[in-house]
Amino acid sequence: MYAQRKREPQGERASSEGDVGRLRLSAEQEEFFQTNGYLPIQQIATPEEVRELRAKIEDLFERRVGEKEGAQEDFLAGEKNGVKKTAPQIMNPVNYLPELHRTQCFKNAQAIARQILGENARCICDLAIVKQAYVGTGTPWHQDEAFRDPKLEYHEMNVWVALQDANVGNGCLRYLPGSHRNEVLRHGPPNNDPTSQALQCVGAFDEGTAVTCELPAGGCAVHHSRMLHSAGPNVSAGSRLAYVMVFGVPPTPAKQAREFPWLAQRDTAAQARRRQWLMRGGVFVAAWRKLRRGGFTTWNGVRESVGRSIRNLRSHS
């Protein structure tokens, strides 16, 4: 059994209703995050906004939006026989719903990120994930930085928003408090299947100190990119939908040389579809989307991004 979550400190509201980011962490909350590597927050979005977000994101899943360009795929099941696809995810749903980054939910998340990481923190990417009722697959223990370039050190955090009540029965998050202070541990593909989107930590760690993080709809969990975390399967009668935003500041060169060999082993169907889509002109669509959401400040940045994508495609051909 997992321990119950720690008592969470309460936050503050900005004094002006017109503030862009109305949510502000208290000193106690900041200290809790720095010490434990995660922080539960009971409300980041209003019930009305949660209902609207849920309806729009569920519509993307139902219409299989982004599937042809490799943006929608089951997050755990790969091509290995016998592994059911029960937990689809959409990478960067903001590409199809630009209004996601105009919500109060996003503004609150951005305000939290800038308070923790600094004023130059920006949204790196977002994703939506649903665990289907009764069968939604659990998420293996992992660190988010294990997906990133080992030549760089990242200063990032996730804001995981529950669009339905998240509890032990439907697969809420689980954390190992303080594990964000460790280096990135060894990872590998779950089920020994390199076609899976997910990674699983196979390095040594003590799961016995894990705590659950149950949240109400509209609540969120903030966690550091090196935090060891997982989530259980959904064995309830209802689906479990979450919207996740990743914020960060520019990465810095790694202090010590390191390698993430598990990244070279990954070969997912979604990656293949994305390469094909990019080769058919998707590089320009991707650059336009990034420009639209404020990912570039100059047209030089657009040209560099397109050129980098083309070079990457050539290296895989």
Image: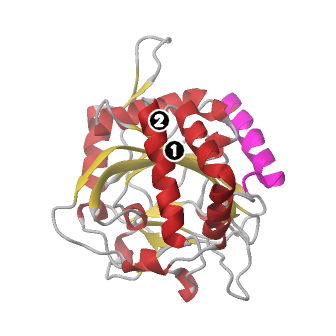
Q: Nearer the viewer, residue 99 or 84?
A: 99
Q: Earlier in the sequence, mark 2 or mark 1?
A: 2
Front residue of this view, candidates 120 and 115: 120
Q: Main secondary structure of the magenta part?
A: helix
Farthest residue toward the right? 63
* Residue 109 sits above or below residue 177 on the image: above
Left or right, 40 with respect to 85, comes to left
Please name the residue shown 45% across and 53% down the image.
308
Whether residue 24 can be seen here: yes
Query: Which disc number belongs to residue 109?
Result: 2
Crowd rating for badge 1 (residues with CA inside 10 Å; few <14, some 14–19, many 20+): many
Task: Tell me where residue 167 appears, x and y as whole percent.
Answer: 60, 58
Callout 1: SS: strand
The disc labelled 2 sits on which kind of residue? Ala
- Left or right of 197, for residue 87: right
Q: Position of residue 236 (x, y in %)?
A: 73, 65
Q: Position of residue 112 (x, y in %)?
A: 39, 34
The segment highlighted magenta reads 48-66
Taking 47 as reference, is 249 left or right? left
Q: CA distance from mark 2 to mark 1?
A: 9 Å
- Taking the view exactly as shown, the residue that stands out farthest to the left is 255
Kindly tell me whether residue 129 is visible in this rendering.
no
The figure's colour scheme reads secondary structure
Residue 220 got which mark?
Answer: 1
